[in-house]
Amino acid sequence: DGIEMIAGLAGTDVGGVVSGVQIPKSAAFIASREILNRLIVVALGLLVLAVVLSLAGSRRITRPVERLVAATRTLAKGKFDVQVQVESNDEIGALSTSFNLMAGELRDREVALTEAHTQLIQSEKLAAFGQLGAGVAHEVKNPLAGILACAQFSLRKADPETPVHRNLTLIVKETKRCKSIVDNLLRFARQEKAVLEPMDINRAAEDAMEIVNHQLELHKVKLKRDLGDDLPTIRGNANQLQQVLMNLMMNAQQAMGELGGTVTLVTAIADDGGVEIRVADDGPGIPHDHLKKLFEPFFTTKPSGTGTGLGLSVSYGIVQDHHGTITVESSPGAGATFVIRIPAMKEIPGAAAPESAPAASSKAREAVPSGGDSR
């Protein structure tokens, strides 16, 4: 009837019969169009879903990166307290964790540098104060010499049985004591090249104790000594070793606090034939976690203004320059003992003792006028 049809034919196994099916051509195109429309809708839906998912995924990646970039800019301005929030365990999370660790280390180093700068300023102040003290001591020495001369001259004419003679004797004794202390201070403050020469460690120890004895007494600290006899001669710088011993004794006094205590200085022959020096106190001791840091520059547990954190570090360097070692024995509540070992002259390569090297004995030192009560 003039209608275009689409037909399909197929043979069968029944008597050679051929079966056929036909539908209008327009009906076939309608079905195809519906399928095409559905495919288009599905494709558009998948496209929209892909865009949404890609935006969400990219945002998940770019947002941590943006935070890292912002934190890096903040870090570049010197603000080391910045931290990045870690939201995942992937590569971005690992990068954020590494950034936080780096920022923390930079913050710790900034704090350490600030403290070091403060301690350097304090060290400069102490150096200036030391120079001023040396100048004052030099000016005091001249009047002391005049007082001593007048007292000794008057003592010759005074009757030994009168109170005047006893008073003049006391004046001479105490003036000699002041003069000895001033001489030690001037010798200690003198800037000199560190020349290692044959020396008696007991003499340096006594000079150091004479200087700090009054300071220790003011803080209720008793100074005990046990200086060995017939110690071997060492090659060293008396001024520097005196500085080490003074620093150890003052540190012990500060560690014991207001209650005071006892500081003991012992010299003896070491097991290797050298000299062993022990500075011990009965204070609170040193915590175990501080022992490894004790000789590091600027490490201190003292309150601000009472220490620079350089004393033990400088002392460590001085002992090393003398081919020796310095160690500490301590536990909380049991005090602390610093042990210095310096080899004898014959044990140092290239150091030959001179034929007439002076080695002052204990009896010879006792003949030297002394003013300290703790001698």
Image: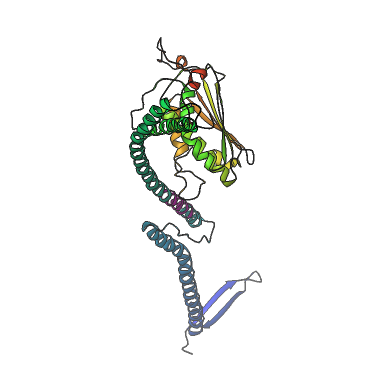
What is the basis of the colouring in this image?
rainbow
Give the vertical position of 79 relative to 174 (above or below). below
- Counting from the top left corner in percent of width and height, residue 116 is at 41, 47
Residue 246 in picture, x, y percent from top left: 47, 34
Q: Is residue 362 above or below residue 13?
A: above
The residue drawn where x is 43% and y is 35% is: 314
* Viewer can see residue 293: no
The image quadrant of residue 128 is top left
In this view of the protein, which residue sits in the foreground, 75 or 347? 347
Residue found at x 52% / y 18%? 363
Q: Is residue 135 visible?
A: yes
Left or right: 220 as drawn, with respect to 174: right
Q: Is residue 128 left or right of residue 311?
A: left
58 in magenta = no
The part of the chain drawn in magenta is: 100-113
Dividing the picture into quarters, in which one does residue 323 lie? top left
